[in-house]
Image (cartoon, helix red, strand yellow):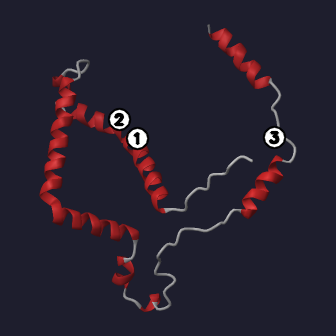
Amino acid sequence: MDDGFDRRLDEALSAPVRSAPEGFADRVMARVAVTPQRRAPVVTLGGFPLAPALPWWVRAAFEPACVLATVVAAALLWRGATLASLATAGAAQLVAWITRVPAVPSAAWWPPVVMMGAALAAAPLVFMLSQLLYRWSAGLVGPRRIALRAR
C-alpha cells in the first residue's frame, strides 16, 4: 500500500511544472497599478506636532494596549457581575461536558499533574487560536481586500 502511494507521489513530483500563460504577470501588474492603494486611517499621536511636549502618561494613553485595558476595565465595572456569572456558567458547562465524555474517566482529571499536563497540551492550541483571533480582528479594522472580477 505504501509502495503505491510512493510511486504516485514520485510521478506527481516528477511531472513538469506548468507555467503561467503568456502575459499573465503583465495583466496582473496592470490591474494592481490601477487599483487604489489606500490604507485605512489610523489615529496616531505621532502626527500631532506637539506630541513630544506631552507628558509620558498622555502618550501612553494613546497606546492600543492601554486603550484595550481601559475598555476591558470599563466593561468589568459596568457589567462585572454579569460577566462573572457568564464565566462561572461557562466553566460549569465545561466541567459538566468533561465529566460526560465516556472515554475519559472523571477521576483521571483530578490529580494536579494531569491537569498541568492537559493545560500544557492545550497551550499550543490556545496560541494558534489567539493568532486566528488577532488576524480576524485586524481584518475588521484594517484595509479591505478588493475582489477582482474576471473579464
Q: What residue appears at the point 55 percent right and 62 percent down from the top-left corner? A: 143
Q: CA distance from mark 3 to mark 2?
A: 43 Å
In percent of width and height, residue 119 lies at 29, 38
Q: Earlier in the sequence, mark 1 or mark 3?
A: 3
Name the residue carrying label 1.
124
Quarter-wise, where is residue 29 in the image? bottom right
Q: Amino acid at mark 2?
A: Ala
Tell me whether the residue at label 2 lies in contact with that at label 1, contact meaning CB atoms closer than 8 angstroms.
Answer: yes
Q: Nearer the viewer, residue 31 or 122?
A: 31
Quadrant into which the N terminus falls = top right
The residue labelled by disc 3 is 20
Q: Mark 1 belongs to which amino acid? A: Pro
Residue 110 appears in which quarter of the rendering? top left
Q: Position of residue 124 (x, y in %)?
A: 40, 40
Give x and y (percent) for residue 140: 46, 58
Type of the residue with mark 3? Ala
Which is more N-terminal, label 2 or label 3?
3
Residue 126 rendering spot, x and y as whole percentages? 37, 43
Relative to 58, residue 68 above or below = above
Q: CA distance from mark 2 to mark 1?
A: 7 Å
The tag on residue 121 is 2
